[in-house]
Amino acid sequence: MSFDLTCKVALVTGGGRGIGRAIALRFATAGANVVIASRKAENLIATAKSAEHLPGRIVPIPCHVGRPDQLQKLVEETERSVGPIDILVNNSATNVGQGPALEVTDEALLKTTEINVLAPHRLIRLIVPKMIERGQGGSIINIASIAGLRPQPEGLAYSFTKAGLIMMTRIWAIEFGKHRIRVNAICPGLIQTDFSEYFWKDEEYMERLRQTQPLAYLGQPDEIAGMALYLASDESSYVTGQCMVIDGGATAR
Ligand SMILES: NC(=O)c1ccc[n+]([C@@H]2O[C@H](COP(=O)([O-])OP(=O)(O)OC[C@H]3O[C@@H](n4cnc5c(N)ncnc54)[C@H](OP(=O)(O)O)[C@@H]3O)[C@@H](O)[C@H]2O)c1
């Protein structure tokens, strides 16, 4: 058993910043070759550059995960540049529908669903049949959220899609277990990234967090990366269909 990922290939969506970047760097430190994919090439290239001294390579491939043709190309280019995929991290997400439930438009709900739920589903349909064919197992890690476990205030679209991703994680785990393809979700609480600045820039919200959260500080992307490494590695060989909550104890109450 080991946390070593030498000779493994990982695909991390949204790996150019935030949690995805921390995961990609942690995987490359453990020896994996990692493709990172999102829309903004400059972030991807900067992340790849910062990994030049690490044992594993980071390869940037620009991709809009809401576009099926781009997902197909992403998988083909990944296989061409670093080989068949052993580890998939579905990390890219959007939250365009924040606000009162009655104000959530069809467009916002559809867009959130397309990026947060359909893109992981499409990637799994592109990658898992090949994992099955190779017969060497695999690890899929879906970055969900505690908002998928309990309702996020005024977060109908976001909570709905993250709850969906958690349920899909369990269904995929049940179906793929016989091929030793493990599927797990990570549910972060509030982590300091661009995505969540609406919350952590709100001083009242932060004061409440400091008063009520057992670990009374704002989580950092690196605090998610260790769990992703565990789930990607052989150390979690008997773990599938689970939801790992990393939230400073926020949901313990
Ligand atoms: N931060 C938190 O408090 C928190 C809490 C719970 C769960 N999460 C989850 O953690 C994951 C990572 O978020 P983060 O906090 O690290 O935020 P972030 O730094 O804003 O990262 C979001 C990533 O998603 C990518 N992305 C967005 N739309 C995309 C699209 N259409 N195609 C491809 N990539 C796209 C972005 O890249 P481009 O802009 O370059 O496309 C970016 O790399 C998300 O699944 C989020 O739901 C975060």
Image (tube, helix red, strand yellow):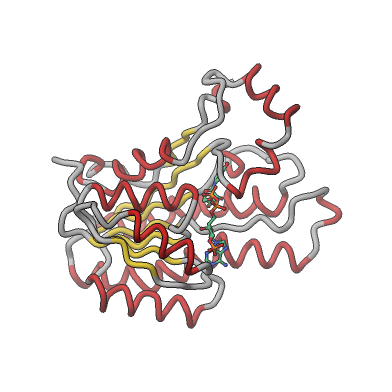
Who's the residue at 56% across and 30% down the image? Answer: 218
- Please state the horizontal and vertical placement of residue 61, each as a whole percent of the image: 40, 72
Q: Nearer the viewer, residue 239 or 189?
A: 189
Tell me if 8 is positioned left or right of 141 in this view: left
- Please state the horizontal and vertical placement of residue 129, each as a whole percent of the image: 31, 72
Q: Which quarter of the frame holds ligand 1? A: bottom right
Tell me if 123 is positioned left or right of 129 in this view: right
**Image quadrant where residue 56 sits:** bottom left
- Please state the horizontal and vertical placement of residue 251, each as a whole percent of the image: 57, 27
Q: Nearer the viewer, residue 143 or 64?
A: 64
The C terminus is located in which quarter?
top right
Q: Nearer the viewer, residue 129 or 120?
A: 120
Which residue is situated farthest in the right direction here? Answer: 102
Who's the residue at 72% across and 50% down the image? Answer: 156
The N terminus is located in which quarter?
top left
- Please state the horizontal and vertical placement of residue 85, each as a whole percent of the image: 27, 66
Who's the residue at 48% across and 36% down the image? Answer: 220
Who's the residue at 41% across and 39% down the image? Answer: 222
Tell me if 115 is positioned left or right of 17 in this view: right
> How many labels, in total?
0
Is residue 252 shown above or below 226? above
Is residue 127 shown above or below 212? below
